[in-house]
Image (cartoon, grey):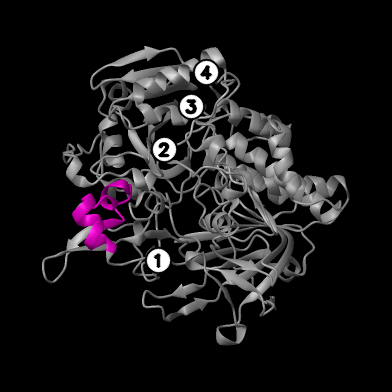
Amino acid sequence: MHRFLVKLSSSSSPFSNQLRSLKNQRLILPLLPSSKPFTSSSVSPPPSPLNASNRFGYPYSADLFRNLSPLNPNSRILGVNGITSSRCISSEAVRESIEYDVLIVGAGPAGLSAAIRLKQLSQEKNIDLSVCVVEKGAEVGGHIISGNVFEPLALDELLPHWRQEHAPIEIPASSDKFWFLTKDRAFSLPSPFDNKGNYVISLSQLVRWLGGKAEELGTEIYPGFSASEVLFDASDKVVGIATKDMGISKDGSKKENFQPGVDIKGRVTLFAEGCRGSLSERIIKKYKLREEVNAQHQTYALGIKEVWEIDESKHNPGEVIHTLGWPLDPKTYGGSFLYHMNDRQVALGLVVALNYHNPFLNPYEEFQKLKHHPAIKGILEGGTVLQYGARTLNEGGFQSIPYPVFPGGAIIGCSAGFLNVPKIKGTHTAMKSGMLAAEAAFGALHEGLNMNTYWDNLRDSWVWKELYAARNYRPAFEYGLLPGLAISAMEHYVLKGKVPFTLKHGKADHEATDLARKWTPIVYPKPDGVLSFDVPTSLYRSNTNHDHDQPSHLRLRDPKIPEKVNFPEYAAPESRYCPARVYEYIEDEEGKPKLQINAQNCLHCKACDIKDPKQNIEWTVPEGGGGPAYSLM
């Protein structure tokens, strides 16, 4: 069963007053009989070794958004494929609405930092400011996954006393190792990383803690609600979002438990959906925000991660290891990480740039190979996997940052793309962007300023200086591994980011995929069930769950392309780049290949939305509360 704890802030809004009597009431919601954590055509997973509870958990969720005033019927929406349309309230079940001063979409580091900063400013200025955060995950932090060696610079600015407030930041980075891997050996290289003063953490746990801090200040946080549409007024200004209807069956009919979505409006709306946010991408395209500043396309990587519990004799809290080379080929950018956390836990991951050429490459299987390298195997042997997950990350850096302001709000965090690639860090920059956007929003609402101050202040901040200095690192590897190492080393150690030119990215990730006839299929070894595992076993460890009886949130723009293009020309790459076996080709009645989409497996990594060769797959939000349930990631 899912357990949801209704937690309301101390806000004086009418909506909160209506639910005051429900404060701290626990609701037990049963899973539907048809619900399964994954689809498996072969192997049944072992019992999960991980207790779903967590030490830093704030299991917010709620029976929410009822008895509210109806939305103005003239409001317009940006829905599937970015099509703008008018909504007629009389033609559908009555949708309710609620209004806030600031609406934040996504309860990640950027969104929660923005909420905290807004509430701090309202207290400093003695101004009542209502702030709402909506989150598609069942719990705050449940969809958060990252390495993570955390740089506390932004947190020091936001909450200077965090060290005295029991933040889940306990293990300082104690050493930096950088290895170049061949199939059987690990060669030590000078480490380009400087993690002195940083910490090895679980980002999902830190986000839960930030959620608690935001609520203490009066932010209203509503997990389990997927933002599926953008709301506009008659002048094309963003005025909020609409949450997804609940209780729609696969055939589109309304089930007995149907509940219409809710229209949540904000005087300012901040999109903090993370990498490749579905609504953020529509906003970027609609307002041509990349063209506004001549930004290049975004580039991405797929990160696959496990958390292991290892033998205490092998555990070195704070040890940080990064690698390049094997198991990836010399033309594929990527590398691995191994971070020693607390409680005998280590975080192991592989990051694969999604502009790889070989359509037969399977990032999940490359990760399984990595664990059999002698330098990695020796650490893991005798250990147990606690959790598995995957997520895409931005790698475009400075060149790919869009103009982040649009009429009615702004885009913050990884939705805009502030990851520092050579540092392999983006949490601190995401948090700072949220803080700067919050200050701009407060100024726009109460000081006669406008949201453009966010862009101005961003360019004057340490975020901009940091990303500018690192701008040529990632595109240098377009020339291959060794040239990339040489160019990046020259810039890092000699020129220190002051080179007088800016390199450009190559093709967009989906365009980089070669036709299958140019490559030989890769035969991957079978998992041994000790270090390497099949997808269903790993997926079980992610605690992923969706209601089976709902329309697929993975939509094909042209349903004929998989069988007519992807399968014959690219050898079905979607069956390999997805780390959750969402896409499988099966035989139809005539013995011909047919794409089957197992949407209930989805980890919300967004790789399909990025890597599909013809950009035929559109990732949209499922019903709120679905997806992975991370507690250690």
Chain-order first, disc 3 or disc 1: 3
Chain-order first, disc 3 or disc 2: 3
Q: Main secondary structure of the magenta part?
A: helix
Residue 492's label in the rendered image is 4
Location of mark 1 (residue): 547
Amino acid type shown at disc 2: Gly
- Contact check, label 4 and label 3, Cβ < 8 Å: yes
Circle nearer the viewer, 3 or 1: 3
Q: CA distance from mark 2 to mark 4?
A: 21 Å
- Contact check, label 3 and label 1, Cβ < 8 Å: no
Q: CA distance from mark 3 to mark 1?
A: 42 Å
The reply, left or right, for residue 627 in relation to residue 429 is left
Amino acid type shown at disc 3: Tyr
Q: CA distance from mark 2 to mark 1?
A: 39 Å
Residue 239's label in the rendered image is none
Mark yes or no: residue 470 visible.
yes
Chain-order first, disc 1 or disc 4: 4
Q: Quadrant of the N terminus?
A: bottom left
Location of mark 2 (residue): 506
* x and y, in percent, of residue 213 in the image: 69, 45
The stretch in magenta equals 561-583
Residue 473's label in the rendered image is 3
Amino acid type shown at disc 4: His
Chain-order first, disc 2 or disc 1: 2
